[in-house]
Image: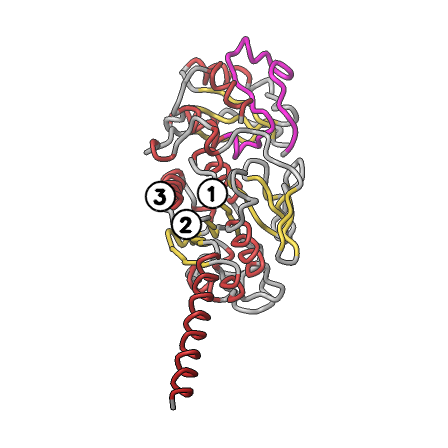
Amino acid sequence: MQQAHFKKIGSIMILSLACAFAAHAQDKKPNVVVIGTGGTIAGAGASSVNTAAYQSAVVPVDKIIAAVPEISKIANVRGEQIFQIGSESFNDERLIKLGKRVSELLKQGDVDGIVITHGTDTIEETAYFLNLVLKSEKPVVVVGSMRPGTALGADGALNLYDAVLVAGSKEAAGKGTLVVMNDEIHSGRDVTKSNTFKVETFRSPYGPLGYVVENKLSFYRLPARPHTTQTEFDIDKISSLPRVDIVYNYGNVSRTAYDAFVAAGAKAIIHDGTGNGSVAEQIVPVLQEVRSKGVQVIRASRTGSGVVIRNGEQPDDKYDWVVTDDQNAQKARILAELALTRTNDPKELQKIMWKY
């Protein structure tokens, strides 16, 4: 009788130790918050062969997470739905709201990393914005998919798994906001969407920072430009952004868009020029007029890559214009908006464009 009693106590102790060990193992996993904003990764099609024709932003983030049960093995994950939109509908107000919520979560001791599910259309703009305004070295990863979860060959599930793996890793800390897609880890500063439907659409001019393969992430290069804790922009101190618009240039371009944006209250216009930010002869006096009204003129290139050279194609010093570095027009717009919260001096704006 006494021996049986001791065996029972021993079994209880073993069970208790096993439970304690399991709880400890659970505690050792990183805590990652997945913020849902919509997009294709939250989309659904009428048929499994619909990879490009589907309705985006219909699946809630908790359901997206639940569809990838393997995630629970690598992190303690909870979801939070902040928007349910296609990313083409992101605007400055939503950017600020998202940034402030991410900032709040990063300050919590029980949050080790953040993943943001996002539509691919403007993922590069959101990632660049967060890369410039967040004040934390904890990993922040923006992720999306090119195919809805209902499609054959859907890429969202693995992209999300990889994003959580990166967001929960110590290796990703201090590298700024990242975009994880198609097994690749990109800097939010560099990455851009380059194709309308291919899963390998996201490209960086200098290549990805690293890869995620077979449950392992490897970094091969580091971001060289200041980001997050190294910038003068702080999302906690930003309540609105000045209006900055983009005018795409082409043969036979007219002044109509420039005039409309100035009349609408633009504080700066990104001239998305041909070649090296070239300006057509009929547009040179238009941009001079725009600048004379106090609106900043920033020359970018529609080519999608390369540096716009100051005083190369136009006498920028003479006209008091600014040029981008290697940012495309949409990224230049994000940086210009933030820069204008700090200064309206074109010389200082130029320094900022070159710095980030």
Query: Distance between the Cα atoms at labels 1 and 3?
Result: 12 Å
- Foreground mark, 2 or 3, reads 2
In the image, 3 versus 173, the foreground residue is 3
Identity, as a three-letter code, of the amino acid under mark 1:
Lys
Find residue 4 and name its label.
Answer: none
Q: Residues within 10 Å of mark 2 (few under 14, many from 20)?
A: some
> Is 68 situated left or right of 239 in this image?
right
For the question of whether residue 344 can be seen, the reply is yes
x 37%, y 51%: residue: 82
Dominant SS of magenta comes to: loop
Find residue 111 and name its label.
Answer: 2
Q: Quadrant of residue 280?
A: top right
Of marks 2 and 3, which one's residue comes earlier in the chain?
A: 3
Identity, as a three-letter code, of the amino acid under mark 3:
Glu
Q: Is residue 189 magenta?
A: no
Query: Distance between the Cα atoms at labels 2 and 3?
Result: 10 Å
Query: CB of mark 2 within 8 Å of CB of mark 3?
Result: no
Q: Residues within 10 Å of mark 3 (few under 14, many from 20)?
A: few
Of marks 1 and 2, which one's residue comes earlier in the chain?
A: 2
Residue 13 percent location from the top left of the image: 41, 74
Q: On the rendered image, what quadrant is the N terminus found in?
A: bottom left
Residue 346 percent location from the top left of the image: 47, 15
Query: CB of mark 1 within 8 Å of CB of mark 2?
Result: yes
| Residue assigned mark 3 | 104
Q: Residues within 10 Å of mark 1 (few under 14, many from 20)?
A: many
Find residue 138 and name its label.
Answer: 1
Q: Is residue 312 magenta?
A: yes
x 43%, y 15%: residue: 345
Q: Which span of residues is magenta-colored?
A: 305-332
